[in-house]
Amino acid sequence: MLLSPEVLTILILNIIFVFFTIIALILSIKIVLKWDFNSTSTLQYSLEKKSYLAATMIKYIFAIKVPLFLFFIFTLDKLSTILTGAMCGAGVVDATDYGNYLFVLKVINLYLFAYWIFLHNEDMKHENYPYIKIKFGVFIVAFVFLLTELILEGLMFSAIDLDELVDCCGTIYSSSDSSYISQIFSMNSLSLLSLFYGNFFLIIIFYFLKKKYLFSIVNVSFIVVSIISLIAFFGTYIYELPSHHCGFCYLQSDYYYIGYLIYILLFVGTFYGLVVGLINTNQKSRLQNYNISMIFNTLFVVLLSAYPIIYYIKNGVWL
């Protein structure tokens, strides 16, 4: 197993997470099965106290896991410096059979954990805890995803072989490669940009119409379309190289860590777009969620659009 300080930190935290989430899982199952807010029994009183304990453990675990995703990305970049052939985190992810599955699962969990935190905060605003069964039910599902993530993470780090040559991002994201990723680059730029800006235009329309479910749906599609557009088109202008499509390299210092800002803007914008349709908040809170989503999505689009525009102004040609 590859045991760098960063990997050790992640693995130690994972052990702590497993210990406390198992306790929270047992309490959550009891609450989901036996909670009755209108009851005055000793059992209900006991469940109310246990709900505070379980919610506190879950809240802090998930609150750590969300920013820990960025630390995981940072760790991948650090590991790329000691793996032969790797130029960035993409090579580390592709170095084992578990990396790609782990990365996709981490992105899903990022939204799931943030959703639980948001749901919990909304639940605590009301005296009758209207979301208590829902949030602990969501945690039971999230526990399965979390446990799967931690297992895959351990398997990935243990499977990394320092003596084995791994593919660099240029090979992984090559348009001549036979993998499914290469199919992304076969898309016409005009079609890709039409999808990207068309999806964003739908977000604007449903924002003004306040169609919350449609607003959430187009935000889900915007996640996928944005990542594909970023890798296939906008990333080449960040690198100023038409053949460089890596989704990790702009997380490095050579590009002023701009990738972190890009992904944070996309996450915040789409996450708040999702919760608009997933949680029935009051009108003031819902409007606030609409605005946060719209602001961050707009900043994301403006930031990406600036790169090809600036490149054209400087060079007089498109890539």
Image: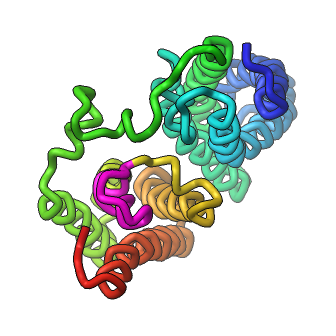
Do we see residue 289 in this rendering? yes
**291 horizontally vs 38: left or right:** left
Residue at image position (70%, 59%) is: 125
Q: Position of residue 81 (x, y in %)?
A: 67, 37
Q: Position of residue 182 (x, y in %)?
A: 25, 37
- Viewer-side residue, 80 vs 129: 80
**63 horizontally vs 273: left or right:** right
Do we see residue 41 in this rendering? no
Q: Main secondary structure of the magenta part?
A: helix
Residue at image position (86%, 24%) is: 42
Residue at image position (79%, 34%) is: 6
Q: Position of residue 184 (x, y in %)?
A: 23, 43
Query: What is the magenta range?
Result: 229-245
Depicted 197 relative to depicted 29: above or below: below
Q: Could you say which quadrant of the image residue 276 lies in?
A: bottom left
**20 horizontally vs 282: left or right:** right
Q: Is 87 included in the stretch rendered in magenta?
A: no
- Please identify the residue farthest to the bottom as the structure is shown: 313
- Viewer-side residue, 201 vs 207: 201
Depicted 259 relative to depicted 25: above or below: below
